[in-house]
Amino acid sequence: MATLQELENLVTQVRRDIVRQVHKVNSGHPGGSLGCTEFFVALYQEVMNRKEIFDMNGKDEDLFFLSNGHISPVFYSVLARSGYFPVEELSTFRLLNSRLQGHPTTHEGLPGIRIASGSLGQGISVAIGAAEAKKLNGDSHLVYALCGDGELQEGQNWEAIMYAAGNKVDNLIVSIDLNGQQIDGSTDNVLPMGNIKAKFEAFGWDVISIAQGNNLTSIIDGLKKAKEQSGNGQPICVLLHTIMGNGVDFMMHTHAWHGKAPNDEQLEMALAQNAETLGDY
């Protein structure tokens, strides 16, 4: 098990990876990626029971599905720094013929990627299918998924949410990135969704709230609590209250950096706030 300081060092390095990836190609989504950095580090380093060598079968291990695929920079960085593929490959982000496309794809066989995600609203449905397959195969491991709060404006999510509760898919843990921002503004201004916690509970889910969604200890404790409460007849929703752009002060609390790359000067400012801890790619 890694120490808290080692995890914090990884968080800082992943932030550097994120801003460098999107800067190089002047394209990508740094805001949501930065906001979910601690979540991905906690999930892959402390929470999931995963095999060292990736295979698409996913038997006898926990699975993760990223629904809001535009935050691929953080996903790729954590996968690489968790040993799924060489860290140096991060330098190919969004380049032609790269395995690291702007939204994750499966046709190039990038280790760690189980679904092509980018068309929003589909990840929960896929995760439900995987969770039910594990039950049918006698596999007691869990299935995790992450989707954005703005993504919940897609109707397919609510069909899936209703199905999971109705069919007692209780080996499923879905985290919602609650940063209150989406590409066109705040979620409340674009399409208010009201009380998301009350909605999930009304649909029959067990809900756990993590108020400090950018605090490693809080995330680890919350996700471990979710694991402990699984298997009790209800799917579990983890409400992760995050800050978009967390760790880079001028990107925080605004939708402006949802899909915008930093220029040279802004990159240096971002890197100055996140020391190189594990070595840049």
Image: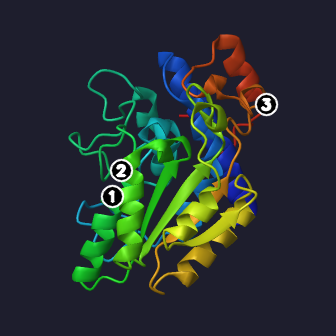
Using the image as rendered, state which of residue 159 and residue 98 is in the foreground. 159
Using the image as rendered, state which of residue 15 and residue 180 is in the foreground. 180
Residue at point 71% right, 29% down?
254
- Secondary structure found at label 2: helix
Using the rendered view, name the quadrant where residue 13 is placed: top right
Vertical order, 272 against 72 (above or below): above
- Secondary structure found at label 3: helix
Q: Residue 125 carries which label?
A: 1
Residue type, numbered disc 1: Ser
Point out the tag, 2 or 3, that comes first from the N-terminus: 2
Question: Which of the two discs, 3 and 1, sits closer to the camera?
Answer: 1
Q: Return the x and y of residue 205 as percentages of the image width and height.
A: 51, 72
Question: Which of the two discs, 2 and 3, sits closer to the camera?
Answer: 2
CA–CA distance in space, label 2 to label 3? 35 Å
Q: Quadrant of the N terminus?
A: bottom right
Q: Tell whether 225 sits left or right of 175.
A: right
In the picture of the structure, the residue carrying the numbered disc 2 is 156
Q: Is the residue under label 3 in contact with that under label 2 (CB below 8 Å)?
A: no
Point out the tag, 3 or 1, that comes first from the N-terminus: 1
Point out the tag, 1 or 2, that comes first from the N-terminus: 1
- Secondary structure found at label 1: helix
Using the rendered view, name the quadrant where residue 189 is placed: top right
Q: Residues within 10 Å of mark 2 (few under 14, many from 20)?
A: some
Vertical order, 267 against 30 (above or below): above
Q: Is the residue under label 2 in contact with that under label 1 (CB below 8 Å)?
A: yes
In the picture of the structure, the residue carrying the numbered disc 3 is 249
